[in-house]
Amino acid sequence: MRSLTRFVPRAHSISWWMLLVTTGAVLITSIDRAILPTVLPALLTDFHLDATQGGILVSLSFIGSTIGGVILGIFGDAMGGGPRRAWAWLVTVMIVILSSVATAWTRSMTLFKILRVTMGIGTGGLEPINVAMISEWWPKEHRGFAVGTHHTGFPIGQFLGPLMIAGIVAFATWRETFLVLPLLALPVVILQIVLARWQHLDSVNAWINDKGMTPSLTRDDKPSPYLKNPFPILMHAMRSDRNVLLAVITNFLFLWTEAAVTGFLTLQLTREIHISLAQAATISGASGITGWMGQIFWGTVSDHRGRKFSLNFLAIGSAVSIFLMGYISSVSMAWLLLMGWGLFRNSPYPVLYAAVIDIVPKSAASGLGLMVGIGLGLSGVIAAPVAGWLIDHMGFGAHYTLLALLSLAALVPIALMHESATDKGDCLQ
């Protein structure tokens, strides 16, 4: 019984509220990343582009994410931990909002491409800063659960986002979909700033200590009123432990497969099973129905059985589910296979993020910025053009076979990692 109760997460009420609000922040990030792939067929028609050109267009967002993930991730640490991360996150949100509104109005392909990069810079910084923030408001012993639950905003957004987009394109054009983000982002920013106060964190830490657990950030870590020098922070994240580099490589492989799938999923559904864009957009979000289950489950398991234990299962499950997606031939099969993929799609990331935070808690946003910038950015730059070329010349079967092999390739860096979970094995005692 004791071993089972250790899986039940415990935290202060403020920690739970912060988890809810930061999950909303991830939801915004998820919807943002869903917009362009979802409306891609309409955009290709509007600008008279083929799939390869569309892939290059998608890759521009990831070029921006490479820049934003690294630079804004370092900025998030230079600002300091605790409440200051909420203000750092506000900067990234404003970049996304301004770029999104401008995208909705532009008629120039050149300006559209520039805005893709700019918006990517903002979205690249959203994730590492927010993940680092939620990790500071939970005990270390339940970090995997907190980050995993926090990341359920991704599958929820992957389901609700396409639904919202489908509703918009049914009555308007793809341009209006970019106006959704400002309406969603501002309330979340305000709530984060209200919750993220030092007196609230003191109350959280007092509760954590009283329960015999370990705080992730204390008053001793309170930042100076000035920005820190960002370069030592970045060097610490890069040199402190081999897990950081291995996590970046693993993250890159998983994100390559995800970017390649989502970038052309609606195109596959409209071409292969001959359905409307609105219907394809709705089905493309099916993975979000099951995605939150996998994230909470594998994040919690990683707290007790180890990060590597969870990641090995996720690599194999991703490979199998992605390979089967090459055989989609009907609406019902699309729903079934995409929901199956949802159990693995987003789950590796919170486990990898928790592994990095275990190692470099004081430069967490920099370490996560490297993962998001290099993993998300570089994978997107490579994945979309390669996927577009494969689809144009060899079809969707070859496309999904390559992605399944890349998922299996992640087993190599996972094997080279050392275990970082603080509570590994406790569930067996």
Image (tube, rainbow, N blue to C red):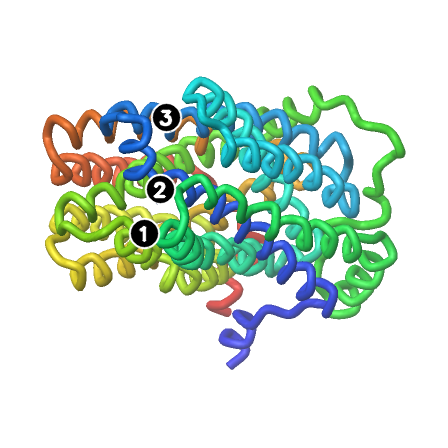
Residue 50 is situated, as x and y percent measured from the top left of the image, at 23, 26
Q: What amino acid is found at the position of numbered circle 1 in the picture?
A: Ala
Q: What amino acid is found at the position of numbered circle 3 in the picture?
A: Leu
Picture quadrant where residue 175 is located: top left
Picture quadrant where residue 285 is located: bottom left
Residue corresponding to mark 2: 39
Residue drawn 53% across the image and 53% down it: 27
**Callout 2–callout 1 Cβ contact below 8 Å:** yes
Mark 3 Cα-neighbour bin, 10 Å: few <14, some 14–19, many ≥20: many
Q: Nearer the viewer, residue 158 or 316?
A: 158
Residue 388 is situated, as x and y percent measured from the top left of the image, at 23, 29
Residue corresponding to mark 3: 57
Residue drawn 11% across the image and 26% down it: 393
Residue 370 seen from this side: no
Residue drawn 28% across the image and 23% down it: 53
Indicate whether 283 appears above or below 402: below
Mark 1 Cα-neighbour bin, 10 Å: few <14, some 14–19, many ≥20: many
Identify the disc placed on residue 281.
1
Residue drawn 65% across the image and 52% down it: 134
Residue 225 seen from this side: yes
Indicate whether 400 appears above or below 233: below
Q: Secondary structure under badge 3?
A: helix
Indicate whether 120 appears above or below 254: above
Earlier residue among tags 3 and 1: 3
